[in-house]
């Protein structure tokens, strides 16, 4: 994929557009999966000694430079002052994903700092800060933005390997599992593509040892209850046990809001209206790319795609503007 480690690559996906100041419910689910990614990263680096299905962490794994601090923040609480701990892969993944919130926060800072140090992650004003109500109230909200080029390259590589016929690397197997457990699948795959993902996961489960061990493991919890009201196609395509949670929950919905931006232009002038929106977004530090112009334009803001829909807000006087609606694969 890139020269990044697995946990760093996944963290770029999981932290993108997440609040950088607060541990929201959705970000907690993401950070738990990021901690689990550290376990898989160490597994891929052959840093476990394996006896049958038991894994023992090699003694020199944590003797690394400060750039690997994020590994320490996950493993030290698990080691609990012992020289080694033995458990199967499920034990390690469950242990990492259920660390106390204070430990998870320390881990988040460590891995985000490692990405910031190589200019692959930054903090910018949240898109909601451009909203009429938030802007007029002077509310400051910060969010993470992953490097756009690296983010696109990473996600497209995952899509290519899992959707195309041929072999799949162990790193991509881990990534697909992490996307499933964090609820990110719907950000990158359409409904039809998820059919293919489900089929490919089942094929990998039948033929690859890591997939056979990893895919039955589930680490998500609690979040399903909070967002189950958003489910509207739960049984549409899931047909196998290993894909049973692909369509199970949508935690990413919380981090994509509909934003209203007032404009100077009347609705009859769509180009001027779009330019007003772009100017507002760029003034807040967002990177904007127009994908399609029209009465309803499609624009990419940082790493997410939105539709810019003409809209009127009725207050004391009607306020014309544009409602930015997240556009997901269909």
Image: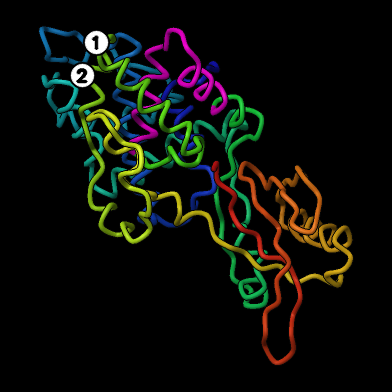
The image quadrant that residue 267 belongs to is: bottom right
Q: Which mark is residue 209?
A: 1
Q: Is residue 274 visible?
A: yes
Callout 1: 10 Å neighbours few (<14), some, many (20+)? few
Q: Residue at x 10, y 8 (%)?
A: 52
x and y percentages locating residue 41 in the rendered image: 35, 20
Q: Which mark is residue 213?
A: 2
What quarter of the picture does the C terminus occupy?
A: top right
Q: Residue at x 75, y 53 (%)?
A: 297
The image quadrant that residue 128 belongs to is: bottom right
Magenta-span inclusion, residue 176: yes
Residue 157 is left or right of residue 182, and the answer is right
Q: How many marks?
A: 2
Q: Nearer the viewer, residue 306 or 109?
A: 306
Instruction: Please provide the residue range marked out in magenta.
Output: 155-181
Q: Which mark is residue 125?
A: none
Residue 187 is left or right of residue 125, and the answer is left
Residue 213 against residue 191 in the figure, above or below: above
Q: Residue at x 31, y 28 (%)?
A: 72
Q: CA distance from mark 1 to mark 2?
A: 6 Å
What is the secondary structure assignment of the residue under circle 1? helix
Asked whether disc 1 touches disc 2, contact meaning CB atoms under 8 Å apart, the reply is yes
Residue 307 against residue 81 in the figure, above or below: below
x and y percentages locating residue 310 in the rendered image: 73, 67
x and y percentages locating residue 53 in the rendered image: 12, 13
The image quadrant that residue 274 belongs to is: bottom right
Q: Residue furthest bottom?
A: 316
Q: Nearer the viewer, residue 70 or 51?
A: 51
Residue 121 is left or right of residue 200, and the answer is right
From the image, give the main secondary structure of the stretch colored magenta: helix
């Amino acid at each position: 994929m890139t020269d990044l480690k697995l946990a760093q690559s996944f963290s770029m996906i999981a932290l993108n557009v997440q609040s950088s100041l607060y541990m929201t419910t959705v970000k907690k689910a993401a950070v738990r999966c990021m901690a689990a990614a550290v376990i898989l990263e160490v597994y891929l680096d052959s840093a476990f000694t394996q006896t049958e299905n038991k894994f023992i962490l090699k003694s020199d794994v944590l003797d690394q430079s400060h750039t690997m601090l994020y590994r320490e923040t996950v493993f030290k609480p698990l080691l609990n002052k012992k020289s080694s701990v033995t458990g199967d892969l499920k034990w390690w993944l469950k242990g990492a994903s259920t660390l106390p919130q204070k430990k998870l926060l320390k881990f988040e800072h460590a891995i985000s700092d490692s990405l910031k140090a190589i200019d692959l992650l930054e903090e910018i004003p949240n898109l909601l800060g451009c909203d009429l109500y938030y802007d007029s109230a002077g509310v400051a909200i910060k969010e993470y933005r992953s490097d756009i080029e690296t983010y696109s390259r990473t996600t497209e590589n995952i899509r290519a390997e899992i959707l195309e016929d041929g072999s799949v690397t162990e790193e991509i197997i881990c990534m697909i599992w992490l996307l499933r457990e964090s609820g990110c699948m719907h950000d990158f795959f359409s409904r039809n593509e998820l059919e293919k993902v489900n089929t490919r996961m089942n094929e990998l489960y039948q033929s690859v040892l890591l997939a056979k061990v990893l895919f039955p493991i589930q680490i998500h919890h609690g979040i399903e209850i909070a967002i189950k009201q958003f489910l509207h196609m739960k049984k549409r395509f899931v047909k196998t046990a290993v894909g049973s949670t692909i369509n199970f929950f949508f935690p990413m919905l919380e981090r994509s809001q509909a934003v209203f931006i007032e404009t100077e232009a009347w609705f009859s002038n769509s180009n001027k209206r779009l330019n007003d929106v772009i100017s507002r977004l760029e003034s807040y530090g967002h990177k904007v790319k127009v994908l399609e112009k029209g009465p309803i334009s499609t624009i990419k803001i940082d790493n997410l795609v939105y539709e810019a829909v003409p809209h009127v807000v009725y207050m004391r006087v009607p306020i014309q503007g544009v409602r930015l609606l997240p556009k997901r694969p269909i």
